[in-house]
Amino acid sequence: MVGKARLGGREAIGLTWSRLLGRMSVTTDLWVDAQAYIPLSSVTTTRAKAGGRDLLLTTETTSYQILSATPANLKLLSPPIPPGFTRVATSPHF
């Protein structure tokens, strides 16, 4: 946990994690709602070490919007089944 902040009028908790991939590092900062723990925003930064220098390669920022549970929005959670496929009640458990 990196701290607390206010994002879009909501109390938020900041979390961070990193991973090393050879000479590259990827760090993600995720801000979640302090009460509901739903994501509000994330920033992922990729850096590389080269010739003794720390180089910023990319920064990706994502803002999340939580839609209200209206019938139209809930329908978005059930994608259409393509022709030739059949909906089954349970997973086939491969």
Image: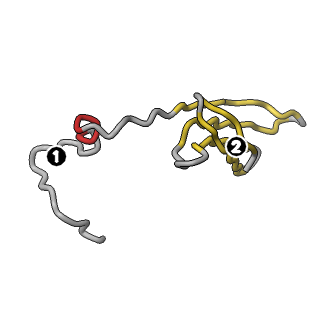
Picture coordinates of residue 45 (x, y %)?
68, 36
* Image quarter hosting the C terminus: bottom left
Q: Is there a contact, CB below 8 Å, between mark 2 and mark 1?
A: no
Residue at the location (74% across, 36% down)?
47
* Dot 1 alpha-carbon crowd within 10 angstroms: few under 14, some 14 to 19, many 20 or more: few
Closest to the observer, 58 or 37: 37
- Which element type, helix, strand or loop, lies under badge 1? loop
Residue at the location (71% across, 49% down)?
18
- Number of disc labels: 2
Residue 55, labelled with which disc? none
Figure quadrant of residue 32: top right
Side of 90 relative to 31 (left or right)? left
Residue 27, labelled with which disc? 2
* Rendered position, 87 above or below 74: below
Badge 1 amino acid: Ile
Badge 2 amino acid: Thr
Figure quadrant of residue 28: top right
Side of 10 relative to 74 (left or right)? right
Q: Which residue is mark 1?
A: 81
Which of marks 1 and 2 precedes in the sequence? 2
Residue 76 visible from this viewpoint: yes
Residue 24 visible from this viewpoint: no
Side of 70 relative to 13 (left or right)? left
- Which element type, helix, strand or loop, lies under badge 2? strand
Residue at the location (15% across, 44% down)?
82
Residue that sits furthest to the bottom in the current view: 93
Render colour scheme = secondary structure
